[in-house]
Image: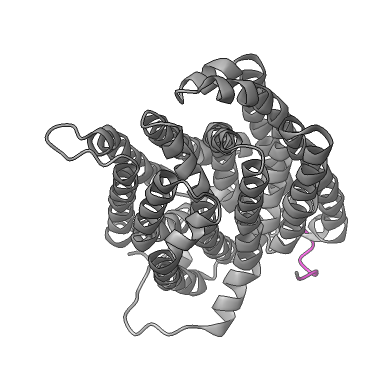
């Protein structure tokens, strides 16, 4: 490989911003949309087994969310550090960050595998005494946690490759995993082609096989293809400085996303006090909204390395222009999602074999909660700026305001005032609270730091 000090200038520092963000974002958008698609397809197939199966998978969603929060949060820290070090042309530090990422992924897997093996049944019994729901949920949770090595590796390696500006190959790996999952779902759930009918357990097995396929391709790309970072685990030793730099961004990202798991857990408890149908509706919403949020997160994934690279290169103009273009793209996606949820809630629920009770609760729920989409677009992209520039704690506080200080207390109060139908208004109201805070902090960060980036005498 050519000496890294004489390589060509990275496109993140030279390509026109509009063209760059499109080229960086569209693979991630497709990848995340496919991820959302197979989450929806997974739930559609499970829903055909009955409302209890859908409720069981919905109750496990906070656990999966927590697992992904730890994996993605750590990977975001690695991604941010790699991008900043590449922008500053500190290539050896970028290599070390990537190597640390793989080891941290293995540690995360061990933790969740042990917890899932020991406590899945206990977790399910917190929500339901229905033996069908408890049994199906326990089986699903054990499988996805014990075999979570694949998803931990997938998200880590994907972020490491994306940090170099390569968004296309991770997209290919993600699509492959999704196709495998979707193809196996009906075979394992309903027992096609001579396979035993496994119901919810089959959905879990299909999920981890798809994740294994994605992980295998990502690892092959990482180790067999030339990149601006080189991973070597031979003689690996933890570096305290690198760990500190990773988790300066990664820990707030973990907590920020884990808060979503706590919120889901709390909402399930609140909704279950009314009816398990409301829990099923919450699960349906979680899958449907991912089809709107995942493309927006894809935009964020494509733009975050650009933010980090140009922050490291101290190029304020490119950093802020990228931020503005990413915001426009996110608002377009979220605005389209809002229109669909407002006009076609019946059609959306029909995909999940909805009962009359699910229609009664779900149509108003989808219309109400979707009002949070536009402020969420601002929060996602702005949070990406904070993460990419080493200020992840700001995003953490925003998430705390929205999902703990906001949603759960509001859900309890509104539920007592007007029943389950009022609970859904907690989402848009809390999003307004978080958006107000993050807008104030973005303005402050620009005034105190970003506006000085072009001054080489000011070191940040």
Quarter occupied by the C terminus: bottom right
* Residue in the foreground of this view, choosing between 187 and 166: 187
Image-based side of 212 in relation to 71, left or right: left
Does residue 228 show up? no
Q: Residue placed at 34% from the left, 47% from the top?
A: 204
Quadrant in the picture for residue 330: top right
Q: For residue 18, say whether it is visible.
A: yes
In reply to whether residue 318 is colored magenta, the answer given is no
* Number of numbered discs visible in the structure rendering: 0
Which residue sits at x=72%, y=27%? 368
Q: Position of residue 351 (x, y in %)?
A: 46, 22
134 relative to 81, above or below: above
- Horizontal and vertical percent position of residue 367: 69, 23
Compared to residue 79, the image places residue 440 above or below, namely: above
Where is residue 174? Give x, y as percent.
37, 43
Q: Is the magenta stretch mostly helix, strand or loop?
A: loop
Colouring scheme applied when the structure was drawn: one colour
Query: At x 77% / y 32%, what residue is drawn?
Result: 422
Does residue 374 sit above or below 264 in this rendering? above
Where does residue 432 sit, x and y in percent of width and height?
Answer: 82, 40
Residue 88 as seen in the image, left or right of residue 123: right
In the rendered view of the protein, which quadrant contains the N terminus?
Answer: bottom left
457 magenta-colored: yes
Q: Nearer the viewer, residue 159 or 145?
A: 145
Nearer to us in this view, 303 or 139 = 139
Which residues are the magenta region? Answer: 454-459
Outermost residue, left side: 194
């Amino acid at each position: 490989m050519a000496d890294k000090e004489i390589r060509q200038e990275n496109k993140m520092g030279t390509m026109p911003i509009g063209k760059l963000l499109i080229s960086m974002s569209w693979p991630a958008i497709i990848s995340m949309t496919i991820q959302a698609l197979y989450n929806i397809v997974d739930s559609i197939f499970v829903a055909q087994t009955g409302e209890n199966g859908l409720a069981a998978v919905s109750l496990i969603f906070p656990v999966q969310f927590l697992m992904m929060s730890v994996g993605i949060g750590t990977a975001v820290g690695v991604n941010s550090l790699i991008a900043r070090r590449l922008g500053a042309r500190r290539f050896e530090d970028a290599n070390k960050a990537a190597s640390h990422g793989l080891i941290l992924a293995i540690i995360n897997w061990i933790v969740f595998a042990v917890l899932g093996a020991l406590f899945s049944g206990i977790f399910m019994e917190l929500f339901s005494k229905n033996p069908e729901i408890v049994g199906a949920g326990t089986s699903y949770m054990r499988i996805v946690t014990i075999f979570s090595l694949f998803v931990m590796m997938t998200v880590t390696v994907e972020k490491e490759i994306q940090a170099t500006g390569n968004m296309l190959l991770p997209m290919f790996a993600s699509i492959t995993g999704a196709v495998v999952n979707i193809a196996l779902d009906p075979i394992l759930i309903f027992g096609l082609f001579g396979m035993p009918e496994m119901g919810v357990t089959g959905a879990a097995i299909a999920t981890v096989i798809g994740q294994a396929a994605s992980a295998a391709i990502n690892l092959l790309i990482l180790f067999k293809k030339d990149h601006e970072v080189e991973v070597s685990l031979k003689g690996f030793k933890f570096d305290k400085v690198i760990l500190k730099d990773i988790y300066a961004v990664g820990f707030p990202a973990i907590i920020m996303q884990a808060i979503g798991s706590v919120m889901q857990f709390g909402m399930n408890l609140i909704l279950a006090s009314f009816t398990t149908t409301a829990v099923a509706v919450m699960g349906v919403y979680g899958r449907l909204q991912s089809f709107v949020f995942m493309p927006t997160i894809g935009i964020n994934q494509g733009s975050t390395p650009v933010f980090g690279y140009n922050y490291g290169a101290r190029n304020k103009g490119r950093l802020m222009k990228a931020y503005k273009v990413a915001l426009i793209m996110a608002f377009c996606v979220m605005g389209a999602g809002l229109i669909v949820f407002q006009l076609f809630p019946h059609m959306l629920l029909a995909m999940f074999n909805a009962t009359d009770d699910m229609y009664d609760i779900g149509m108003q729920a989808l219309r109400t909660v979707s009002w949070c989409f536009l402020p969420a677009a601002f929060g996602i992209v702005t949070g990406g700026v904070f993460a990419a520039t080493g200020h992840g704690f700001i995003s953490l506080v925003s998430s705390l305001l929205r999902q703990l200080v906001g949603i759960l207390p509001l859900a309890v109060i509104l539920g007592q005032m007007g029943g389950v139908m009022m609970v859904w208004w907690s989402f848009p109201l809390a999003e307004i609270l978080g958006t107000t805070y993050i807008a104030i902090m973005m303005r402050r960060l620009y005034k105190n730091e970003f506006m000085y980036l072009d001054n080489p005498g000011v070191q940040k």
